[in-house]
Image (tube, rainbow, N blue to C red):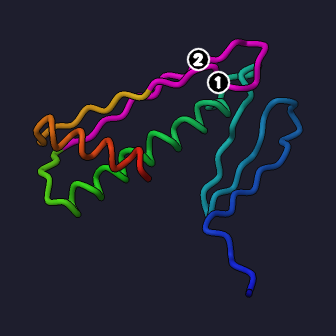
Amino acid sequence: MSAREPNYLIRSSSSGTVGRSLNAIRNHHVVIDSPSIGEAITSGEAFLSGVSACAVTLTEGAARELGIPLEHTEVTLSGYRAPDRPAFERVEMRFVFTGPTQEQAETLVNRYKDG
């Protein structure tokens, strides 16, 4: 079996300031802070934004594939984490669609859940 190239390659490095990382994603460069600094986007915000962006693009693609009329998609993620714990205790996700019926919207959300 031959080695596969990764689909994604992100390089993160220390910045010289404790709690701040420098991140390279293709030709994009992003500063991400720990919550202790919080001037730039934080690591938790970056993580959750990736999840919500995936939800938007996946449901848009599913709508196109299934012929569901979709004018606009909005996904809101709320993360709950105790300040002294590194992991989220709970994450809530809310989808708002403009265009589809309730049944069609549920189909899109289920498509996202199924991956």
Mark 1 is surrounded, within 10 Å at the Cα level, by few (under 14), some (14 to 19) or many (20 or more) other residues, namely few
Describe residue 31's horizontal placement relative to residue 13 as left or right: left
Under circle 2, the secondary element is strand
The residue that appears at 63% across and 19% down in the rendered structure is: 89
The residue that appears at 86% across and 33% down in the rendered structure is: 17
Under circle 1, the secondary element is loop
Does the magenta-highlighted stretch encompass residue 83? yes
The residue under label 1 is 88
Residue 84 place in picture, x, y as percent:
78, 13
Marks 1,2: beta carbons within 8 A: yes
Describe residue 55's horizontal placement relative to residue 28 as left or right: left
Q: Quadrant of residue 101?
A: top left
Task: Locate the N terminus by quadrant.
Answer: bottom right
Q: Nearer the viewer, residue 4 or 22?
A: 4
Q: Quadrant of residue 62?
A: bottom left
The residue under label 2 is 80
Name above or below for residue 3 compared with residue 113. Answer: below
Residue 59 place in picture, x, y as percent:
31, 49
Q: Nearer the viewer, residue 22 or 107?
A: 107
Number of marks: 2
Q: Which mark is residue 61?
A: none
Q: Quadrant of residue 26?
A: bottom right
Question: Which region is colored magenta?
Answer: 72-92
